[in-house]
Amino acid sequence: MKDKCIKCHRNIHITDIDIEMEVNRVIQSGVPLTGNEQYEKRLEACKNCKHLTDGITCMICGCIVKARAMNALRICPHPSGSKW
């Protein structure tokens, strides 16, 4: 990872299993989920953001973007305003 995780204060490696667990946690939480089209648009915005590291983590808030983007109640934490 090229940067330190904002939440962990140390370098960590997030695995596909970690991502899957976080996505499942969001699904099981009962929050409203985005539709597939909205989800893909959100991921595309994240993919084009300079604050995304390793294609996984938002360095503004420390979230796993695949999990945050599926929660319909969440917004992008970009300092200049949500990008989705």
Image (cartoon, rainbow, N blue to C red):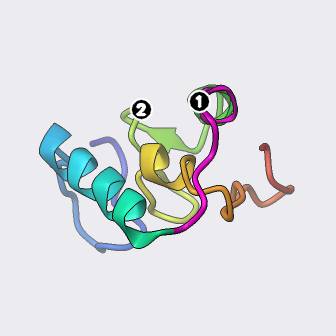
Residue 36 part of the magenta-drawn span: yes
Residue positioned 19% across, 52% down in the render = 18
The residue identified by callout 1 is 36
Q: Residue at x 41, y 32 (%)?
A: 55
Q: Return the mark for residue 79.
A: none
Query: What percent of the width, then of the height, locates residue 67?
Result: 44, 51
In screen coordinates, is 7 left or right of 60?
left
The region drawn magenta spans 31-40
- Disc 1 versus disc 2: nearer the observer: 1
Distance from disc 1 to disc 2, alpha carbons, whole Å, reads 19 Å
- Residue 44, given in percent of the width and then of the height, sits at 63, 25
- Which numbered disc, 1 or 2, marks the residue that appears first in the sequence? 1
Depth check: give the residue in front, 18 or 72.
Answer: 72
Instruction: Identify the image quadrant of the C terminus.
Output: top right
The secondary structure type at the circle numbered 1 is helix
- Residue appearing at x 58%, y 52% in the figure: 33
Give the vertical position of 55 relative to 65 (above or below).
Answer: above
Residue 57 inside the magenta-drawn segment: no
> Splitting the image into 4 quarters, where does residue 45 fall?
top right
> Please, what is the three-letter code of the amino acid marked with disc 1?
Asn
**Residue 10 to residue 47: above or below:** below
User: Residue 55 got which mark?
Assistant: 2
